[in-house]
Each structure stands twice: as C-alpha cells, then as structure tokens.
Image (spheres, coloured by chain):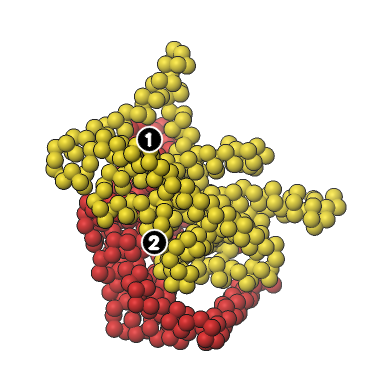
Chain colours: A red, B yellow
Amino acid sequence: MSANSQNARSYIRAAITIGAAALVYEVAARSGYFAAALMPTIPTIARTLYAGILDGSLIEHAAFTLYRVMFGFGLAVAVGVPLGILMARFAAVENFFLPLVSALMPIPSFALVPLFMLWFGIGNLTTILIVFYAATFPMLFNTWSGVRSVNPLWLRAAGAMGADERKLFWKVIIPGASPFIITGMRQAFLRAWIGVVGAEMIAASDWGLGWVIFDSKEFLQTDVMIASLVVIGAIGFVFERAVFGSIERATILRWGMVRAAKG
Amino acid sequence: MAHASGQANKQCWEDADTVQDAASTVAVTGMDDRAPSAGVQRLRLIARNVFPFAVVGAIWEIVAWAGIFPQRLFPTLEQVALSFVQLTMSGILLHHTVETVLRLTSGFALAAVVGVAIGVLMGRSRLAEDIFLPLVSICAPIPGLAYAPLFLLWFGLGNVSAVLLVAFVSAFPIIFNSWTGVKAVKEIWVRSAQSMGADDRRMFTHVILPGALPYILTGLRLGLAQAWRILVAVEMLAAVPWGLGWLIFGAREFLNTDAMLAGIAVIALIGLALEKFVFQKIEDYTVVRWGMVAA
C-alpha cells in the first residue's frame, strides 16, 4: 500500500470519527435534556460564527488578540535571544541571571495578572506584559542551551580558518544554535497564545477573543463562546503549522541542521 | 498527524532537557573552581546564587522607599515579609495552600489515569487511534483557559469545574506522549520478546510499558506543569472559597499588594518544589536508573 492511499484512508477515518462525535453532540443538544442556552446545536454555532465573521466583530476581536500576542512575543524574542546568547557566552552574565530566571520561571504568568492590573491598569499594557512574561522564559532557555550546545569542533575549525569574533558569531554560533532558537520560538508562541487568552479574561479590557469568551458567559451566549473557541483554535493551528513550519523549512531544514521527521 | 506530534514530542523532550540542564547547571556552577576546601566552595556557591537576589532586592527596596509609586501598590520587602508571617501564623496562607495543592493533585491524578490509559490504548490499537486522535488533535491546540467559561457554565462555579478543567487541560500532553512512547518502542525489542515466547500480558508489562516510560514520564511532567500554570488562573475565575489564586485575586480588591506578593512567593515555591522534588526524583529512580536516558 502506498503512503498516499494510507494517508487518504486515515483522513477518511478521521472524518468519520469527527462526524460521529458531531452527531452525538447534535443529538444530545436536540434531545432537550440539556438547556438549549448551554448546549447550542451545531447549526446555531455555525450561524453565529458566520455572522460574527461577516459583521467583522469576531475579526476585530481576533485582530486585538493577535496584536497583543505579536507585541508581547516580539518583546520576548527581542529580550530572550540576546540575553540567552550573553548568558551562554559570558559566565558573569550567566551567574547573575540564571538564579533569578530559575526562581521566576516556576511562577505561572497568570499569578502575576492581578499584580500587573494594580500596577498598569486594565487593558493592552497588562496583557502585553503578561504575554511577554510567559514567552520570555522558553525563548531564553532554548537560546541559552542552543548556544552552549554548538559543536566545539566547529568553533575550533572556524578559528583555525581564521574567523574573527564577529564572523564566528554570525557564521557559526547563530546557525548552530538556530534549531534550538526556533524550537524556543515555537514554545514561546504557544505560551504567549495561552497567556493572552487568560490575561484577556482576567484583566478584562473591551476587545479580544479571551474577553469575548468570558463576557459571553455572563449573557449565556454559549454559541458565541464556542464560535470564539473555534477561531482561537484555528489561529493557533495556523501559526503552529503554517508560520513556524515554513520558518523551519526555510532555515534549519535547508541548512541541514536537522533532518525532517519521517512518517 | 504522526509526523506533527512526533515533532511536538521532540520539542517536549528538549523542553524537559533544557529545564533539567538549567537546574543541574545551577548546582554545578562554581564547582569547577579549585577552591581549597569543600566548605569554602560551598559558601562561594551559596554567595554566587544569593548575590543576584540581593541586588534585585536592594533595587526593589530603594524604589519602594523613594516613594515613586504609592506605598499601597509597591510595598517594601519588610511589609511583604510581615504579611507573609502574619498570614502564615494565622493559618490562612496554609489553608489556601492546602486547598490549591489538593485541587492540583486531584485534577492531575484524574488526568494521569485517564491520559495514560487513552494514550497507551491509542498506541496499541488501531481502532482507538482512529477514534481518539482526531478528537484530541482538535481539542489540544486551544489554550486550556479558553475552555474555562464553558466548563463554568456546564459544571457550575466551584471545585468541580476547577478540578475537571485542570484534568482536561493536563491530559493532552499526557495522552500525546504516552501514545508516542508506545509507538516508539523498538520493533526489535517486541520481536525478540515474541520469539522468546512472551504472551500479551508479559509483553505489555515487561517490554511496552518500560519502553514507553521515558515518554510517559515526560508527558506526566509536562501535564503537571500545565496543570499548575492553569490552576492559578482557574482559581481566579471559578470563585472557589479558598486557594492561592483566589487569595491573590481577592487581595487586589482591597489593594493588599503585600498579601498578593506573599501569595505569589508561595506559588513560586510550590512550582519550584514540584519540579525539583517530584519529577526529577521520579526520573532519577526510573528511567535514568534503567539507562533509558543519560543522566
């Protein structure tokens, strides 16, 4: 059996499973055993989703959420990568920051939300800072271990061929650490994405997908809630697969730093 | 699908590795100095780890005393320590902590049992894989907290929602890793056990389970970390009567920044203890000892 037909078969099976699960849900929703407000039927959810996209409200919420995520994530990369490299290259920096980072890392980002709300108020700033806090640590740790794990043989070979510090850095260390850095970005984005939804719920501003979900609880709009969940899932999925997948293909796979996973 | 989760798993391993690496480096830095005696070396190590905290603490104190920010919002460290001691002495902090830890353990235990069972079943049976994989792959990428309002509507405010949500969220990494672990058991081990006449049960307990254990443990570890991250937020949203998340959220209403910071300190300590004493120990006793991964 060729790999292709096997793929097709597993898609068909997945479709059957999802169809069956949807059917079970639909039957439960229509049975009247549960309150209709709590368990909307699938057509209702689809209509809400469609209407939300058409009148632009869901898109606007998504845009706000994305803005916060990208801002916080960008900050995390801008701080995490240089600091990680410095920590790996200079023992003094490592000695200073490592204990601090190890102490801060186990604090879940949500624990800081109330504190940040007091300090920075409700809204964008708090949310962005929470995202930044959540995303920085994976970025920092992966960069740090990536730079440390650059094969010393490469460093010596480049040194023997007369590479100066700057060339060594750009041509050997950065490409060598890139698989770790990209893994770090992926993890950081995942954390950021989790962080933004929670921060939007707690530090309720007036826009954002997390806020919509939480707000629709107040009005028992379960259909709006589930529609927003679908949008959140879709955006996360697109980023994970399309954005980071293509970054990976364009850099480290092409440079031959890792082999493509098979199967 | 298999390809993607294989990659996810690789990342999980790297995640766990880096964390471990960090921890061991904390312990190792300073060891390579040729200090005269073990005592001096120890002191130097402690001093090196304390120094950054002293610097940050001093900066905090200066800012707090300078009065740039209102005292209520930016208390001095003495105030935080004082409220920490007061809350501990009155037993309030202890009560909050116990409730949080109970919620964490019950949610995580639920996730561990169900998650490992589903994951192993998915790894062993084609039918189970076909049924669960699509559902799990759809539900997993949505951030756990996004489900919170839905759970609150379905199961009401309070403990049931909190525990179920923690279990639901932490089950995903456990399922994925157990599944990959069972799939990653080397074919040659299975075949050699078969040729030596192992029946299904022995095969499972002696080959599959030990072979998959490093992955399962990674999954449990990630699941626990996930549960911990989510629990604090869930406690804020689910209106539970006790719990550290509620403590810091409630303290905001009364501008008790010192109580809030004391709560955050306890949360940090629990997180650190989970990592250091629970999972590193389990890993040392099982997979490292069996030589499944390098120590």
Check the image and name the residue furthest to the right: B197
User: Where's residue B41, x and y in %?
Assistant: 43, 19
Residue annotated with mark 2: B239
User: Where's residue A129, x and y in %?
Assistant: 28, 54
Q: CA distance from mark 1 to mark 2?
A: 34 Å
- Mark 2 is surrounded, within 10 Å at the Cα level, by few (under 14), some (14 to 19) or many (20 or more) other residues, namely some
| Letter of the chain that mark 2 sits on in the rendering | B
A12 relative position to B227: left or right: right
Task: Quadrant for residue B45, please give it.
Answer: top left
- Mark 1 is surrounded, within 10 Å at the Cα level, by few (under 14), some (14 to 19) or many (20 or more) other residues, namely many
Task: Quadrant for residue A163, please give it.
Answer: top left
Please report the residue visible at 26 percent of the width from the left and 38 percent of the height from the top: B79
| Letter of the chain that mark 1 sits on in the rendering | A
Q: Nearer the viewer, residue A111 or A181?
A: A111
Instruction: From the image, state whether disc 1 or disc 2 is nearer to you.
Output: 2
SS type, badge 2: loop
User: Where's residue B222, x and y in %?
Assistant: 51, 52
A100 relative position to B109: left or right: left
Q: Is residue B41 visible?
A: yes
User: Where's residue B180, x and y in %?
Assistant: 61, 57
Q: Nearer the viewer, residue B117 or B251?
A: B251
Residue annotated with mark 1: A99
Q: Quadrant of the N terminus of chain A?
A: bottom right
| Number of marks present in the image shown | 2
Q: What amino acid is labelled 1 in the image?
A: Pro
Q: What amino acid is labelled 2 in the image?
A: Ala
A1 relative position to B135: left or right: right
